[in-house]
Structures are given as C-alpha cells and as structure tokens.
Amino acid sequence: MSMVDGRGPFRDFLGNRLLVKRLAARDIRGRYQGSIFGALWSFATPLLLLSAYWFLLGVVLQARFGTAPQIAYPVILFSGLIVHLFCAEVIGRSAGLIFEHATYVKKVVFPLTVLPWMSMATAVFHLVVNLSILFIGQLLIVGHIPPTWPLVFVVLLPLVPLLLGLSWLLSALCVYLRDIQQVIPLVLTMMMFLSPIFFPMEMVPASLRGYMYLNPTTAIILQVRAVTILGQAPDLTILCIYCTISLAVMGAGYWFFARTRRGFADVL
C-alpha cells in the first residue's frame, strides 16, 4: 500500500515528524554551508532588504504610513514584509521541490508528501528570525511593545495550512507543467505590491478594497499589524473564515499531490 493512501496531511506529518525534523535541519545547514558568516545570513538578509526599502521609501521619498509617526515607518513596513517573505519562501520553493529531491522520487518507501512540511519548517525558522528582528527593532525604534504582541503567532497560524496546500499543488503541477516555474516569481512580485505592505488600506479606493482580500497575504498583514503595532485584539471572524479556506486548500492540494505522485518518476 502507498505511504499516502488513507493518510491525511496531519497524520502524514505526525507519522514522519522525525524525518521532517532531520530534513529541515539538513536543509537549513545546507543553505548556509560554506559561507563565512553561516546562519548569520538569515539575520543579515532581511535586515539589508528592510534597510533598502526604508532608505528608498522612508528617507528618499519621505513616505509616511497613514497617520503613523515617520520614525515608526520601518517597523510598520517590516511587519508586512515578514508575512510576504514567509509566503514567498514556501510558494517560491514549491516550484522546484520535487526536482530538488528527484533521487527520492523512485524510492517507494520515501513519503514524498513530507517535502512541503520540510520546506514549511525551514520557512518557519526564517519567520522566527524575522519576528525577532521586528521585536527588537520595535523596542529600539518605537520604545514599547504592546501586550498583544505574542498573539502574532495566532494570527500567522492560518497561513500554514494554506501554504502547505499550495506547496503540494504547485510542486505536483510543476512536474507536468514546467512553465509554472516561470509564472510563480511574477505572481509573488504582484502579491507583494498588491498587498498593504507599503501603504495603508485607507489609501485604496473603497470600491477596490474588497479585491485586495483576494491576495492571501492582505488579511494576515492587517492582523499582524493590529496585534504587534496597534495593540488591538485579532479579528476572530476574519481568522475563522481564513482558517476554513486554508484547510480546504490544504486538503485539495494534498489530495492532488497524492493522486499525481505516481507519475513523477515517469516524467523525471
């Protein structure tokens, strides 16, 4: 019997959690292996990216984020950028996930469905690093941390099943339709600029605001800012709706991956 038959995505993870842990640890080590600064690049990269955006938008263009003080602009910017980077890492990597691990495809005993869990674990590692930078930066720049800050993990949680579902779906599709690999970076770029990372939702015309929520990062970015910067409680209605959609996408993506994986070896 196939390793995926009769197993749901969560049962599949629990049954192979030690394998996922080893794969993720090796993945993180391999990403920085051979570099002089090693894992410090996981801190340096988002800091450099934030500095570039802040200098261009905050210093050169003197951009402001609504009525927020100018000094808080880099913190507000980074709080939204964190969500996009998390999504971009998982989705962007899904395009080549099967090709990266082609040697596992013909091994019947290897559960290929754990590969998106591995890429998710790696992305969560970088997410925690970025949240640490946000926390320290907010403390130094703004001067205080609202008591709702720990709820950031609650509002980010609904993203996990959504991204896993997309990872299963896209990684399987890319085996058969390689053109998707060229489309994904373009979609991710559009997602970044069509989300409230660089501007408040109030700047979007009221007639178009509803369309902004078609971007899967929009609702989460707003909730992250609510709990980390504004000190507001998360909107449970929005999160419940988001969770429902995320779980549906997760189930559909897992089902598609499980049904199409039998043909991976023939295509590769």
Image: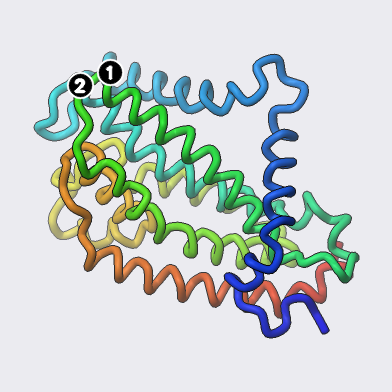
x, y (%) of residue 13? 64, 65
Q: Find disc 2 in the rendering and name its residue.
A: 143
x, y (%) of residue 214? 34, 62
Q: Quadrant of the C terminus?
A: bottom right
x, y (%) of residue 197? 31, 40
x, y (%) of residue 56? 34, 19
Contact, mark 2 vs mark 1 (Cβ under 8 Å): yes
Q: Quadrant of the N terminus?
A: bottom right
Q: Find disc 1 in the rendering and name its residue.
A: 140
Image quadrant assignment for residue 200: top left
User: What amino acid type is highlighted by mark number 1?
Assistant: Leu
Tell which of 51 and 151 is nearer to you.
Answer: 151
Distance of mark 2 from mark 1, alpha carbons?
A: 5 Å
**Most distant residue in the left direction:** 67
Decide if residue 266 is on the left or right side of residue 96: right
Look at 41% across and 49% down and name the residue there: 191
